[in-house]
Image: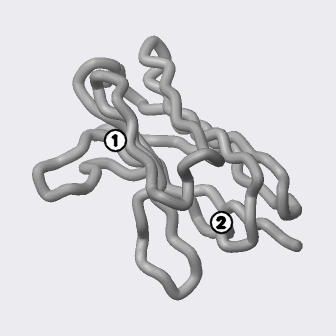
């Protein structure tokens, strides 16, 4: 089964930046899209951004202009570069792969914590 491993989370102050990485255990370069969800305490998991197999991208409104998703197909890796972080960005960020007809990813990573403090 495909496994995803996230890294790059941490603690930053308001206005800071972080870059998350997610590596897939198999070569899924052209087969699957990848992306990121997040879940804040007491809230449902929500889509942050995803990049499709054709490299088209989608962002949540709050991420537009601050976050940038990219991928290295040769390494089956997806990145999320986050700038101008706000306290509301505090959440566990989950990497996902292979979008399904149910409108969600088929595979998930364990998540990486992002904490933004004022």
* Depth order, front residue of 29/25: 29
SS under mark 1: strand
Q: Is residue 100 above or below residue 29?
A: below
The quadrant of the picture occupied by the C terminus is: bottom right
Can residue 56 be seen here? The reply is yes
Q: CA distance from mark 1 to mark 2?
A: 22 Å
Say which residue appears at 28% left-offset and 50% top-offset.
Answer: 105
The quadrant of the picture occupied by the N terminus is: top left
How many other residues sit within 10 Å of disc 2, few (<14), some (14-19) or many (≥20)?
Answer: many
For disc 2, the marked residue is: 89
Residue sitting farthest toward the bottom: 42
How many other residues sit within 10 Å of disc 1, few (<14), some (14-19) or many (≥20)?
Answer: many
Can residue 110 be seen here? The reply is no
Say which residue appears at 36% left-offset and 24% top-offset.
Answer: 55
**Which of the two labelled residues, at mark 1 and mark 2, occupies the earlier sequence position?**
2
Task: Give x and y (percent) for residue 114.
Answer: 70, 61
Task: Give x and y (percent) for residue 89.
Answer: 65, 66
Residue sitting farthest toward the left: 101
For discs 1 and 2, the disc positioned in front in the rendered view? 2
For disc 1, the marked residue is: 97
* Depth order, front residue of 48/27: 48
SS under mark 2: helix
In which image quadrant can residue 92 be found? bottom right
Task: Give x and y (percent) for residue 103.
Answer: 20, 56
Say which residue appears at 44% left-offset and 48% top-offset.
Answer: 59
């Amino acid at each position: 089964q495909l496994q995803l491993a996230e890294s790059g989370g941490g603690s930053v102050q308001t206005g800071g930046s972080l870059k998350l990485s997610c590596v897939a255990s198999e070569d899924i370069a052209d087969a699957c899209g990848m992306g990121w969800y997040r879940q804040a305490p007491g809230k449902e998991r929500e889509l942050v951004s995803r990049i499709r197999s054709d490299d088209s991208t989608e962002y949540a409104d709050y991420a537009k202009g601050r976050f940038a998703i990219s991928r290295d197909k040769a390494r089956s890796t997806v990145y999320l570069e986050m700038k101008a972080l706000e306290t509301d960005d505090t959440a566990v960020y989950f990497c996902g792969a292979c979008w399904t007809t149910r409108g969600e990813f088929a595979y998930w990573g364990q998540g990486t914590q992002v904490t933004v403090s004022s």
